[in-house]
């Protein structure tokens, strides 16, 4: 078996996961070149593009995701701020409505940025562009991997104009999102089929940009009304993004779908659990059409469990796991996967031992958020759950009930949700005591939104 170190890598997909992975790989001194290949042109500005149609819709970047992205793209914050994005302390600058009223407003130290997805992706892309080891190759569709025995040795691409080309390398990272062909390529290559975990709970989005003068000077930057099973199948999200505009995404679970005509969109907003978003947009100036999106369901390929796994190949981001976007985890997952590659490369810089270890680390980094998201999805589907899961869900419900009345419960819960803290924080006195007090007092929720 030949052992060779990874000097040049190819990343399939120039979305947030692919770009962050490329930046992480480029940090290794022995790496000389990382090529990011995408079917879209990668020289455009911060606007939605064909290969990432979700770019029209609101994207929350969790605290941990932002931190990990900045670790690999150190100038990310200044690039985003210079384009009009806003830094926020999540609990101080967001007003969140839960089943039992508005969550307590407090400084939590959960720091993140509010911007559109295209701007976040563009800013990471600029970091990649300015990196002398990274080459961006747009307008090139990858249609296969090149295999030599049990090793992946490169990719086959077709550029715009139908020119075919093989790109040889020491490592291929598949970050091609939901469109990934990795499972087919592996099966065709004789590696067998991965086990797939799927949750067939679709969700629907409709999104419009607005100018909203009356929100100028408000202390908050984001308004969020989440879905909560089993009674709240609708969500609404409004955020101040670059250019002083507001992005408004409305969403529904299963058959609930926000309409794409003005009247229907407003009516859906009016029927959310609180009228704050409707009040903000009813007489605001629309700055875009209404874009819709149907997310068909969550899916995770258990590549790490395959008996046979090729050398020099890893799968990251949505190509590995893609969960219900209502939980806002996708970009954070991609950043955590890049960090998993980074830490594995430090320990194993040879193609032979690297890829299986990296895929196992990627799986480990994903498990908590996947369990959380699919646990919530299963509540909509009324899937029978083990008693232990039911107990944890029951306790989380009690925490949500307590959030409007307790800073401790709010900060504890949000830190875990943003992956800034270990879930064991939920079982410390800071969270348990207010939950017990609230269960005894059974306080009535207030429908008044905090300023
Ligand atoms: C409506 C909606 C709302 C969402 N909201 C949030 C949110 O609030 N917060 C959050 O963190 N996440 C959210 N997500 C999820 C988030 O968009 C994804 O998790 C994230 O974009 C995944 O990044 P990625 O780089 O893995 O894949 P993508 O961003 O999908 O990038 C894949 C890239 O691969 C390219 N590609 C695909 N196939 C090929 C090929 N064969 N050859 C060449 N190039 C190829 C595509 O052009 C694309 O550029 C949302 C998703 C949806 C649908």
Image (tube, rainbow, N blue to C red):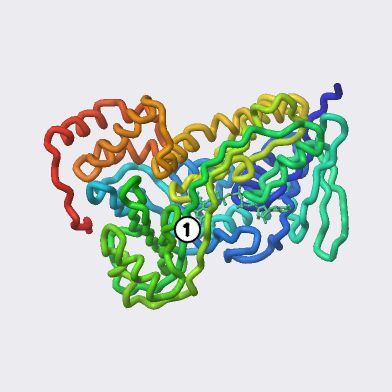
Left or right of 395? Residue 375 is: right
Instruction: Say which residue appears at 74% left-offset and 52% top-offset.
Output: 37
Based on the displayed image, in which of its 4 quarters is residue 320 positioned?
Answer: top right
Based on the displayed image, in which of its 4 quarters is residue 153 positioned?
Answer: top right
Left or right of 346? Residue 257 is: left
- Does any portion of residue 216 appear in the rendered image? no
In this rendered view, identify the residue nearer to me: 270 or 331: 270
The image shows residue 300 at horizontal and vertical percentages of 58, 39
Q: Secondary structure at mark 1?
A: strand
Instruction: Say which residue appears at 82% left-offset and 52% top-offset.
Output: 157
> In what quadrant of the picture does the N terminus appear?
top right
The image shows residue 198 at horizontal and vertical percentages of 56, 40
- The image shows residue 124, relative to residue 257, as above or below, that is above
Q: Residue furthest top?
A: 1
Instruction: Say which residue appears at 77% left-offset and 51% top-offset.
Output: 142
- Does any portion of residue 157 appear in the rendered image? yes
């Amino acid at each position: 078996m030949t052992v060779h170190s990874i000097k040049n890598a190819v990343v399939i997909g120039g979305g947030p996961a692919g770009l962050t992975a490329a930046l992480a790989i480029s940090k290794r001194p022995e790496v000389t070149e990382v090529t990011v290949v995408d079917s879209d042109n990668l020289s455009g500005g911060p606007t939605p593009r064909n290969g990432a149609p979700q770019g029209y819709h609101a994207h929350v970047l969790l605290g941990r995701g932002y931190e990990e992205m900045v670790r690999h793209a150190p100038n990310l914050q200044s690039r985003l701020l210079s384009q009009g994005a806003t830094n926020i302390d999540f609990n101080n600058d967001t007003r969140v409505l839960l089943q039992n009223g508005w969550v307590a407003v407090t400084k939590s130290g959960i720091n993140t940025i509010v911007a559109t997805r295209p701007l976040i992706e563009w800013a990471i892309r600029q970091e990649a562009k300015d990196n002398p080891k990274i080459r961006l190759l747009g307008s090139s569709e990858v249609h296969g991997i090149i295999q030599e025995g049990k090793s992946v040795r490169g990719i086959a691409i077709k550029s715009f104009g139908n020119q075919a080309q093989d790109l040889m390398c020491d490592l291929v990272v598949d970050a091609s999102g939901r469109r990934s062909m990795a499972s087919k390529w592996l099966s065709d290559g004789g590696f067998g089929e991965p086990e797939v975990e799927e949750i067939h709970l679709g969700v629907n989005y409709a999104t419009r940009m607005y100018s909203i003068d009356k929100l100028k000077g408000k202390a908050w930057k984001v308004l969020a009304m989440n879905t909560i099973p089993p009674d709240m199948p609708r969500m609404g999200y409004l955020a101040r993004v670059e250019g002083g505009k507001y992005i408004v995404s409305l969403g529904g679970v299963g058959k609930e779908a926000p309409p794409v005509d003005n009247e229907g969109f407003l009516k859906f907003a009016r029927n959310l659990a609180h009228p704050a978003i409707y009040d903000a947009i009813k007489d605001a100036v629309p700055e875009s059409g209404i874009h819709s999106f149907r997310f068909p369901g969550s899916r995770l390929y258990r590549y790490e469990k395959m008996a046979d796994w090729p050398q020099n190949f890893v799968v990251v981001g949505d190509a590995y796991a893609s969960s219900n976007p209502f939980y806002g985890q996708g970009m954070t997952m991609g950043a955590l996967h890049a960090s998993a590659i980074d830490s594995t490369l430090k320990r194993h810089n040879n193609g032979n031992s690297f890829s299986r270890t990296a895929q196992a680390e990627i799986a480990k980094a994903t498990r908590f958020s996947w369990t959380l998201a699919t646990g919530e999805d299963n509540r909509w589907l009324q899937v029978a759950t083990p008693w232990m899961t039911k107990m944890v869900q029951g306790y989380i419900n009690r925490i949500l009930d307590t959030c409007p009345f307790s800073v401790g419960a709010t900060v504890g819960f949000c830190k875990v949700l943003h992956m800034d803290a270990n879930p064991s924080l939920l079982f410390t006195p800071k969270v348990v005591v207010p939950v017990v007090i609230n269960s005894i007092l059974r306080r009535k929720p207030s429908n008044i939104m905090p300023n």
